[in-house]
Amino acid sequence: MPKVLEYTPAWLSRGKGSQAGFDLFRQDGRAQSKRKDGETSRRTIAHRGTEIFVAVGKEVRWADLRSFKDAHESKDGHQGNGYRILKTPAAFDITTLSVSPDGSLIAVVTAHTCHVGILPTSAHLRSGETSPLRLRAFQVGPTAHVLEQAPITTALWHPLPKPGVPSLLTVTKDACVRLWELDIDNRHSFDEPSIAVDLKKLGNATSTATDLSASKYGAKQGFSPDEVEMQVAAACFGGSGAADEHAWSGMTLWVAMTEGDVYALCPFLPSQFTLQESALPGLTTAVVAETRALTSDVEATESEKKKVDSQTKWLADLDEQEPTTLIDDTTIERNDVYSRPAKFASIPRLQGPFRLSPEPDFGEITDIHVVAPLIDQSELYEEFGDEDEVENEGLSVSIICLATNTGKVHVCLDLDGVEAEWLPAKRSRSFALDDVDDDKDLLLFETIDLVAADVDTAHCGFTASPSDRYEVFVTSPAGAHTLDFNPWIFGLEAELTYPHDEGSALRLENLLDSTSTLVDHPLALSSPPTSTVIALLDSTIGFFLLTSNPSGPVAATLDPPHAPQNPYSPTLLALPAPTPREAYQPPATFYTPSTLPQLLKSNPATLKQRLQFTPSTLQTLTEAHRVLSHETHNLALSAADLFRRIERLRSELIYQVSSVRNMSNRVDTLTGADDSADFSRSIGPAEDGGDGIVEDAKVVGSERIEQRVLAAVGANKGLEERVEEVRRKLGKLGGGGGKLSRREEMFGKEVRRLEGMIGGGRKDDGSAEEEGGDGAVTPPVKPGALLRLPNSPGELAEREDAPAEAAKQGPEVDGQSLTARLSAIEDLRERLDKEVEDALGRLQSASEDNGRASRSGVASEWKKREMSRVMALMEREEALIEAVTGRLSALGGL
């Protein structure tokens, strides 16, 4: 969503050097606009590039925003060309201005009349002339759009006209739709429409033989039960005819009624229309696919088959034509001009009313806006082999937005889509409208509140964004709002195109709960705007929103949308900009002349005579008091608002001063200008004379920062030198490729020998660790040589097993590591402990038996000698084990 960069620029504000831009919207005595309460939003501002047309009362004023900006930025004080008045035949206040897509015509619409004027070229209007210019204008429908007929609710240009023949669509409140194919060389094209249809009659029609003509001037109108429910609020087309849109969208006319019903007409086309080069193949592909689906569907109704068959014949008729190919100079796209098939009626069938599900709490609809669905272009370009390069970023269903007079916007989805449908040529039993399912639904996706709950009436109007199709501006009494649908369209499209339905309800529920439309309020107004906002996108003035209120123009410059050239390039984050604020604009009350002089001039005789207490004098004083009280009350309100702003400015100024003071203290701390700084430098003897006294002076300001920078640079250089020295040493050790010295080789051999002794004498791959190529490393002492007990059971067993073990192990015994040797010693110790325990047990049992048999002293002496001998052997064994363990620990670091 774009951010607001600047509010009403200086070249549109009141003041010296910009008065022309402000006066463009100013109402004077010649052009007074009287707006009634309850009137819908007006569209009194139109644009052609950077040229804007403003309707003030009965006048149309022209100006160039680029000229205003350039004149304000120039230093010569020139105010540009100013604005120019374009005279039109409008006899009443203008309610709508609309410029044709090619910029050659402008529609000037009042409440009951419509005129189309031929616009001069931009170069002619920029010539510098400021005198009023009378437009060559024609009245559209001199008998259809008159005071005696219903008021005009919508006037818009058809998006698919033949080049050079703009088509204007007018919709009146009594549900009469007229299409005018305007040719400036044919005056009759302004008098009679090419298509005129009454939607009330069309809704009840059963065939094309029914009279569907719109009401004519002087003709009697009968009673219709749909007269109240069929009052039109607004109308719009479903698309702009772009190449990535569904082709049916640009041909569909959507009509919204004030009571809440929505209808559609498709195809609603002039006698000659243009299509994109890919539109006809896309429609043919879709219709053929639908035909195949209905052929295989046993539940398909006869009316559905008839509809698809009619579409096939209509497309076949277009395919047989030889269209005229034109190339658009601005977009460089090829457009084909076709003629409307004569075999089919020019008036399509009325589709609807569309039911909203769930049904919202409606007020009265004031405007409608439709976002066209996008097509899957990969299917069209699949035959060319470049379907991977086609990007489909959008929604495949239409988005219908309905604005109400309660300040709410209903966002709906058309999941089924609108396709071409026609009435039968005559009523027959084989094709009756009773068999057609008229039920059409719109899924209510979201309801957005734009105004406060205490506001009773809030008419809203839509304006399409020039930068993003899924962004729309809404004008309400509170200002201009921005609705951005991008947060949820991609997730919804992923669910709609997912081939499996399992779990779709849960996913859609999570999508609705987690995402919603982004709403922003770029323009906040204290008084209701007098016109629906317009949006411009230009390289000179940027992304620009413009509207007006009774005090003057109100605008906002938004952040223009831009995409990086390289999607993988790092994003450069700009410094945080201050929050933009709208400059104070003096209200019009301060500049509106008083009406009291005009009141006094209306009865000059009373002023010239002596003051007398008569009823006429009392009436004059009463009227003067009423005028003065009203004007002074407005002045007091405006002055009170000014004083409130001054108080707010004063408080904000105090806050800003405090913030600047804090920032200044921080800067002083960094630069050493505060009293707490203790940085000093020594000043030596002066070169040119002086007393040579050395004193300390505080280093502050840029000099201190420079010293800190120099110190950091010096430290950085020191680190670089140390790194370079380490790099050189590493290069000498192994990176230079030189030979090792004799001591280094000996040290390496010793390390490898100890590694083999500790780690098992083998590498990771199981090969024997070699020492200088001499074979495996042999331990210094064998485990069997650590302790010898003559004639012990262990020694006898070892003697018996020695030949067998030597034959099995071979040279592997010599390659045991210190760890293996230590493990062998522990096993030997455990075995000896068991043997000693067994010997002690046998001796004790033998001594008990011998003690009974003989108590002589010889046995006692022999027993003591044997026990002392065993204890000596045990002590010797423990001493040897401890010595070996200590030696192994010293060698292996255990």
Image (cartoon, helix red, strand yellow):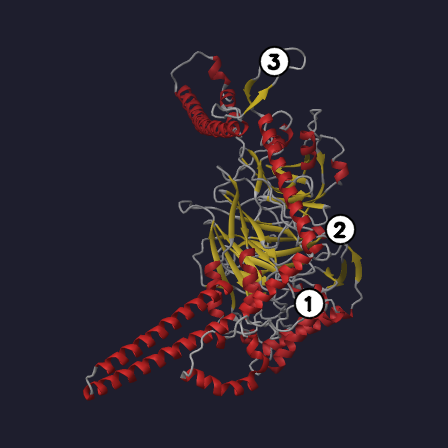
Q: Position of residue 606 (x, y in %)?
A: 46, 17
Sequence-wise first label, 3 or 1 = 1
Between disc 1 and disc 2, the foreground one is 1
What's the CA distance linking mark 2 and mark 3?
A: 80 Å
The answer to whether residue 245 is left or right of residue 173 is: right
Q: Position of residue 82 (x, y in %)?
A: 68, 31
Q: Label 2, on which residue?
A: 330
Q: Position of residue 263 (x, y in %)?
A: 55, 62
Q: Label 3, on which residue?
A: 692
Camera-nearest residue between 508 and 158: 508
Amino acid carrying mark 2 in the image: Thr
Q: Position of residue 429 (x, y in %)?
A: 58, 79
The answer to whether residue 120 is left or right of residue 305 is: right
Camera-nearest residue between 54 and 70: 70
What's the CA distance linking mark 3 and mark 1?
A: 88 Å
Amino acid carrying mark 1 in the image: Ser
SS at circle 1: helix
Q: Dot 3, crowdedness within 10 Å: few (<14), some or many (≥20)? A: few
Between disc 2 and disc 3, the foreground one is 3
Which image quadrant for residue 86?
top right
What's the CA distance linking mark 1 and mark 2?
A: 25 Å
Amino acid carrying mark 3 in the image: Gly
Between disc 3 and disc 1, the foreground one is 3
Q: Label 1, on which residue?
A: 378
Q: How many marks?
A: 3
